[in-house]
Image: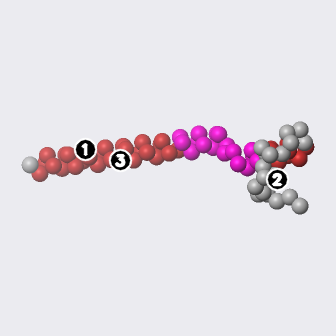
Amino acid sequence: KETSEFTETQHHPKTLKTNSKKYLKVRNDYYQKELPNKETIEQRNQEEIKKLLKELKNEKNSLKKMKKDYKEMK
């Protein structure tokens, strides 16, 4: 009976014979599960960058406002 998790030595792709069908199946399963999707990572990075840029812009605007308020107070 196969489980989704790899047992230490038995089912890990690097330890199975490279020419067996079982190896290929396990290897493919391994890469599909274990390796993250590159496009997803790129997308996540882009979203993170947008978020940070927005925060920076807000910060800059609040600083401008503070500066203006300070000048008016003088």
Q: Quadrant of residue 38?
A: top right
> Foreground mark, 2 or 1?
2
Q: Which residues are magenta?
A: 30-46
Q: Quadrant of residue 28?
A: top right
Residue 20 drawn at (x, y percent): 90, 42
What's the amino acid at mark 2? Gln
Residue 37 drawn at (x, y percent): 67, 43
Residue hosting label 3: 58
Give the camera-side residue of 4 and 44.
4
Residue hosting label 2: 10
> Which badge, 3 or 1, comes first in the chain's sequence?
3
Color encoding of the figure: secondary structure
Q: Is residue 6 left or right of residue 66?
A: right
One can see residue 70 in this view: yes
One can see residue 29 in this view: no
Check residue 5 for magenta coloring. Answer: no
How many residues crowd around disc 1 within 10 Å: few (fewer than 14), some, or many (20 or more)?
A: few
